[in-house]
Image (cartoon, grey):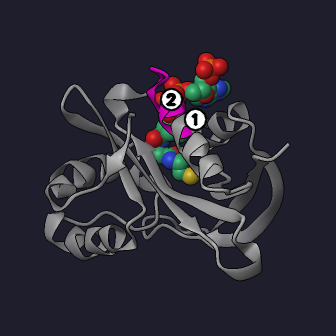
Amino acid sequence: MIRRPAAPDDLGAVHAIYMHAEVVPYLGIDPVPLDGFRPVFDALLATGSFFVAPLDGSVRGFYRVTRHAGRARHAAALETLAIAPAAKGSGFARAMIEEALDCMRAEGILRVELMVEADNPRGIAFYRKLGFEQEGVLMRAYKRASDRDYVDEILMAKWLGT
Ligand SMILES: CC(C)(COP(=O)(O)OP(=O)(O)OC[C@H]1O[C@@H](n2cnc3c(N)ncnc32)[C@H](O)[C@@H]1OP(=O)(O)O)[C@@H](O)C(=O)NCCC(=O)NCCS
């Protein structure tokens, strides 16, 4: 098993990856110091479905799974996903997400959705490699404080059933 549920002690490691210059442009919030990140991290912990992926004793990646409710219970969103830049291109991200998909399948999840920014070609290529397909575009749904323009979000999904 690569993953484990995130714990309070993971705050520093998750913050370091999240705020890395190659990562933070593609996640949910603008750069903040550790103290400003604490409430965001606490909210992730409170979901009970925020996972970290350690390698050789250090956290190298993380992601969150949010299962929908009611008649959409067979679907889940994959969010807040990143790999430490030092582990980029090593296949670790692929292994981390393939395990996540196996765990979701085992829990009865059949549909996995995610959103990736239109200006994140590496992320889009990564998800395509893992079998996600584009379903739509959310126009101007994302904006970094450092940018003048709004960015489109690409909605991608993968069906885990037969
Ligand atoms: C997106 C991210 C997780 C991908 O991690 P990674 O380390 O590049 O991925 P891996 O090395 O595990 O590669 C997995 C597969 O994707 C492919 N891939 C990765 N980047 C690619 C690119 N730019 N073009 C084509 N294929 C690519 C790899 O070739 C590999 O395929 P293979 O196993 O058949 O060789 C990582 O770049 C990241 O954390 N980025 C910053 C945060 C981010 O963008 N998160 C997503 C927000 S929606």
Looking at the image, residue 44 lies above or below residue 158? below
How many neighbours does mark 1 have within 10 angstroms: few (below 14), some (14-19), or many (20 or more)?
few
Where the C terminus falls, by quadrant?
top right
What's under tag 1, amino acid-wise?
A: Glu
Percent across and percent down for residue 34 are: 16, 64
Q: What element carries label 2?
A: helix
What secondary structure characterizes most of the magenta part? helix
Looking at the image, residue 139 lies above or below residue 83? below
- In depth, the one of 44 and 111 nearer the eye is 111
- In depth, the one of 62 and 36 nearer the eye is 62
Residue placed at 43% from the left, 28% from the top? Answer: 88
Disc 2 under 8 Å from ligand 1? The reply is yes
Q: Are the residues tagged 2 and 1 within 8 Å (C-beta)?
A: yes
Q: What mark, if any, has residue 95 been given in the picture? A: 2
What's under tag 2, amino acid-wise?
A: Ala
Residue placed at 80% from the left, 47% from the top? Answer: 161
Distance of label 2 from label 1 (alpha carbons): 5 Å
Position of residue 81 in the picture relative to residue 55 (left or right): right
Q: Is residue 92 magenta?
A: yes
Which image quarter has ligand 1? top right
The image quadrant that residue 6 belongs to is bottom left
Percent across and percent down for residue 83 are: 40, 39
Q: Is mark 1 on a helix, strand or loop?
A: helix
Percent across and percent down for residue 72 are: 74, 74
Position of residue 14 in the picture relative to residue 77 (left or right): left
Where the N terminus falls, by quadrant?
top left
How many neighbours does mark 2 have within 10 angstroms: few (below 14), some (14-19), or many (20 or more)?
few
Disc 1 under 8 Å from ligand 1? The reply is no
What range of the chain is rendered magenta?
89-97
- In depth, the one of 89 and 24 nearer the eye is 89
Residue tagged by mark 1? 98
